[in-house]
Amino acid sequence: MGSSLQRATSRLCASALSSTLLWAGCLPHADLSDYSSSSAEQPGSIESLSGGGGGGEASVGALEGAAGAGELGPDTMLPLDRNGSGAGASETAPEDAGAALLDAALPPPAQGDGGAPDAGPIANACTLARGTLEPDSSVCLIFVSTARVNWQAAVLGCQTRGATLVSVQTLSRNDFLTSLIGTTTIWLGGNDPGTNPAANAFVWPDQTAVDLELPVWASGEPDAFADQFCLVKTGEAAVPPGPAAPWRDRPCSDFNAYVCELRL
């Protein structure tokens, strides 16, 4: 009888190995004690679950508590979602979490002096060249106001700046120059390469013909006086019906300031 009971108990224990509670009940007390003492320092040990002792009811309560431990709070190793609660990998993509961390680490956008936006590379380049950017263009006009040189020296002065002596082929360019030079007379880039002063065959540095009909000339200009093969824009006041700062043809050996045209 005793032998039959023993065999039945063995079969029952073998079928219940998947249950920790039944498995513990099937072990002899001496074996359970040895297991508890040897594994007390291990996470999830029977002793840690049972509080170091107690009967089967205490073990059942401990195991039930362990089963519900996941409800205590979010996994601290997972990124937080937008509401501050734990989010699994399926809820928050790694790149989203990285972007959030990067955004948090970046300083606020830097402002320029006084919060003013950057003027742009063309305007900055013109400023470095000590020029003035012509409105709605990429042309920088460099007014060399303190120079007093002949026409050829003015040409060379512009070349050293990577520019040319200024051309004026539109009234808008002429008006802008008028506001730029004030009462100073400047050399223009136009000259007559011939030898006949009466021909008035002036051309700009790109060999485009100077428009003799443009309403920019002083009265009677250009004239036919000898040796007047270069052009100036004067600082003269307007003499109606003539324009302010009118043009004249002058000897190329005169001494004047000049304006360079730098294309950016």
Image (tube, rainbow, N blue to C red):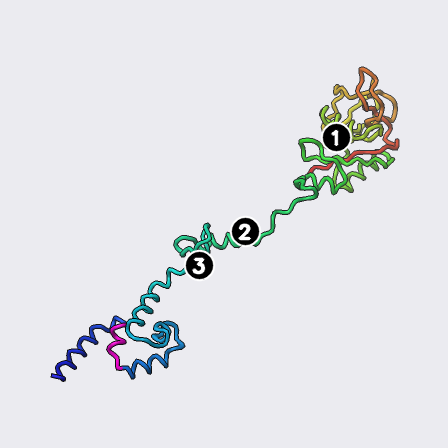
* Residue span colored magenta: 21-28
Q: Position of residue 153 (x, y in %)?
A: 84, 37
Left or right of residue 145, residue 7 in this image: left
Front position in the image: 58 or 244: 58
Front position in the image: 251 or 60: 60
Q: Residues within 10 Å of mark 3 (few under 14, many from 20)?
A: some
Verify whether residue 5 appears in magenta: no
Q: Position of residue 84 (x, y in %)?
A: 46, 53
Q: In the image, what residue occupies the spot 78% across and 38% down?
A: 158
Is tag 3's residue or tag 2's residue first in the polypeptide sequence?
A: 3
Q: Residues within 10 Å of mark 1 (few under 14, many from 20)?
A: many
Q: In the image, what residue occupies the spot 46% across and 57% down?
A: 79
Front position in the image: 160 or 171: 171
Q: Residues within 10 Å of mark 2 (few under 14, many from 20)?
A: few
Rendering quarter of residue 5: bottom left
**Main secondary structure type of the part rendered in magenta:** helix
Is tag 1's residue or tag 2's residue first in the polypeptide sequence?
A: 2
Return the residue found at the far top. 241
Q: Nearer the viewer, mark 3 or mark 2?
A: 3
Q: What residue sits right under mark 1 in the picture? A: 167
User: Which part of the image, by quadrant, shows the C terminus?
Assistant: top right
| Amino acid type of the residue that numbered disc 2 sits on in the rendered structure | Asp
Rendering quarter of residue 1: bottom left
Return the residue found at the far left. 1
Q: What residue sits right under mark 3 in the picture? A: 78
| Amino acid type of the residue that numbered disc 1 sits on in the rendered structure | Ser
> Distance between the Cα atoms at labels 3 and 2?
18 Å
Q: What residue sits right under mark 2 in the picture? A: 103
> Distance between the Cα atoms at labels 1 and 2?
52 Å
